[in-house]
Amino acid sequence: EVGPTMVGDEHSDPGLMTFLGATKRNMMGNHFWEYYVNDAPRVVLDKLESCGYRVVSMTGVGQTLVWCLHKE
């Protein structure tokens, strides 16, 4: 997969979003905000691993991949 990668919502930790280099945006028609980065998912997952997060599960929803992570 290539970017962009959605990394959070309006309730996400701002410090972590800054660390990931994420930008907050609101897509037309959505009633919520989301954070995204232009990095590929593997780059984002490597950064999150360096902060103590581990992948617990992964699934595909249509053309979207979703990872569930847990911080040690």
Image: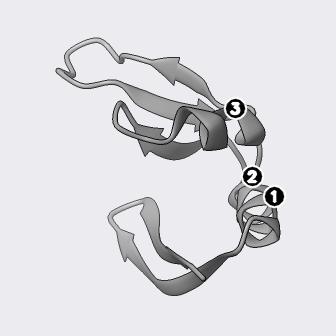
Q: Is residue 46 above or below residue 21?
A: below
**Quadrant of the drawing holding the C terminus:** bottom right
| N-term-proximal mark, 1 vs 3 | 3
Question: Looking at the rendering, in which quadrant would you find the N terminus?
Answer: bottom right
Which kind of residue does numbered mark 1 sit on?
A: Val
Q: Which amino acid is tagged 2?
A: Ala
Residue that sits furthest to the top in the current view: 28
Query: Horizontal placement of 47 versus 5: left or right?
Result: right
Counting residues from the start of the chain, the first of labels 3 and 2 encountered is: 3
Q: Residue 43 carries which label?
A: 1
Q: Which residue extends farthest bottom?
A: 56
Percent position of residue 44, x then y = 73, 56
**Gap in Å between the C-alphas at discs 3 and 2?**
17 Å
Q: Mark 2 points at which residue?
A: 40
Please report contact status of discs 2 and 1: CB closer than 8 Å, yes or no. yes
Judged by depth in the image, the label closer to the viewer, 1 or 3, is: 3
Mark 3 — residue? 18
Is 57 on the left-hand or right-hand side of 50?
Answer: left
Badge 2: residue crowd in 10 Å (few <14, some 14–19, many ≥20) = some
Q: Residue 53 carries which label?
A: none
In percent of the image, x 63 and y 81: which residue is there?
A: 54
